[in-house]
Image (cartoon, coloured by chain):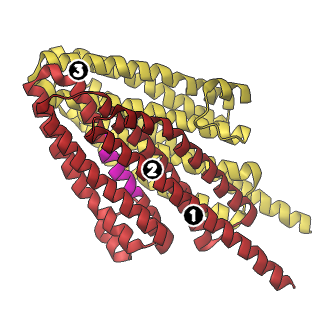
Chain colours: A red, B yellow
Amino acid sequence: MEHNISKHISGRFNEELENVRNHVLSMGGLVEQQLNLALEAIAENDADKARKVSETDYRVNAMEVQIDEECTRIIAKRQPAASDLRLVVAIAKTIADLERIGDEAERIGKVALDSFTKDQQDLLVNLENMGRQVSKMLHDVLDSFARMDARRAFEVHKEDVKIDREYEALTRQIMTYMMEDPRSIPKIMDLIWSVRSLERIGDRCQNIAEYVIYFVNGKDIRHTSQEDIEKSL
Amino acid sequence: MEHNISKHISGRFNEELENVRNHVLSMGGLVEQQLNLALEAIAENDADKARKVSETDYRVNAMEVQIDEECTRIIAKRQPAASDLRLVVAIAKTIADLERIGDEAERIGKVALDSFTKDQQDLLVNLENMGRQVSKMLHDVLDSFARMDARRAFEVHKEDVKIDREYEALTRQIMTYMMEDPRSIPKIMDLIWSVRSLERIGDRCQNIAEYVIYFVNGKDIRHTSQEDIEKSL
């Protein structure tokens, strides 16, 4: 009888953990959608889409608060240990980064509210390219989270170097443009902020990859070199 | 007898909570010191000080990882509930923001590695002014954390509007400067990044204020208007 009860409790506990995991995946899906909509807004110079990103951000925020509450409730009620606790911790950290990625998407979308000359379109095309890479990185890290696949998470972790290189190159290109056409500076600064936002999203994807590896390996690998991470896998 | 044991256990638990709280205050002190050193480096154009900030950042990172482990250990071993659990959650979130403030301080310090013309010194002076305000905000929010004083935390929360206004004004001023002297753009961009970093530190101080209010009130007030926060106090 007691065994049954404990099985029952643990069954419900697993259900709760499964629910909260699913909520994170929904939140991740929404944030991915927000980033892609912001990039579309820029590519199509569509102010309505940019406004839509901005209007939808409250949903991302609400999801973070709700999932955070679920995590605290699970810790208080279920007193999880070992890998269950690591899962809750990894989730609580992941949603904080997802929420900030949502904020960055909103900022990026705002570029679509400006209008650019034919000349400046070249810069936009490069921004879009970088955006696509970052969007893929976000997709891949959410995938590694869904499967709790540390190897896959590590692959994403390594991709961030490429994003950083892209960021350096594009920032240099934009600065050169500003030097050649100083009157364009205020508008072009919005572009630079977007490039920076994309770079930050890359960093946050790297954070999420670290939480997945922490959950699977039981080791906190933040501030650890990639060689050492690889050894630990 | 049983009562004594439970009292003993709870006594040790309180000691552990007290310890972890003290560690957060030490980490906060170090981060404050890093920010102030970075600002001094700029004011005195002292590259050594800037390098010192950069070299010390690993200690901030190490403290975050250590305190994070303490938090997870406390949750697993002590199964805290109610306000104890809220304290642990507030701590875990606070140290994440402190670590990022440390990163921003490192970025800000790098401005001291450039040399500026007499003309550009005016921009630096304004950066230093803004830096002082942000440093005070960090000091005040750490103070509200030390006392777990929600009212004081709310005062800091409201200060961020001023920082944001300062940020807007200074960014506009720097852009005007770049338009007048386009050759200076690459160097001046470093200044703009620093201004942005200061603005971000303001946001993070606001986050920490929200965790203090969450701990005291038991209510998550992120994404809540300041009028509603005030009502809840």
Horizontal side of A183 relative to B131 (left or right) equals left
Sequence-first tag of 2 and 1: 1
Q: Is residue A204 magenta?
A: yes
Question: Vertical placement of A224 versus B31: above or below?
Answer: below
**Closer to the camera in the image, A121 or A146:** A121
Q: Position of residue B204 (x, y in %)?
A: 48, 37
Label 1 neighbour load within 10 Å: few <14, some 14-19, many 20+: some
Label 3 neighbour load within 10 Å: few <14, some 14-19, many 20+: many
Q: Is residue A113 magenta?
A: no
Q: Position of residue A159 (x, y in %)?
A: 27, 61
Please indicate, yes or no, whether residue A34 appears anywhere in the rendered image.
yes
Residue at numbered disc 3 = B175
Real-space Cα distance between discs 2 and 3?
A: 32 Å
Q: Chain of mark 1?
A: A
Q: Which quadrant of the figure contains the N terminus of chain B?
A: bottom right
The kind of residue on which mark 2 rests is Val
Residue at numbered disc 1 = A21
Real-space Cα distance between discs 2 and 1?
A: 15 Å
Q: Residue sitting at 87 percent across and 85 percent down?
A: A1
Q: Chain of mark 3?
A: B
Considering the whole magenta stretch, tell me its main secondary structure: helix
Residue at numbered disc 2 = A31
**Closer to the camera in the image, B34 or A193:** A193
Q: Bounds of the magenta span?
A: A197-207
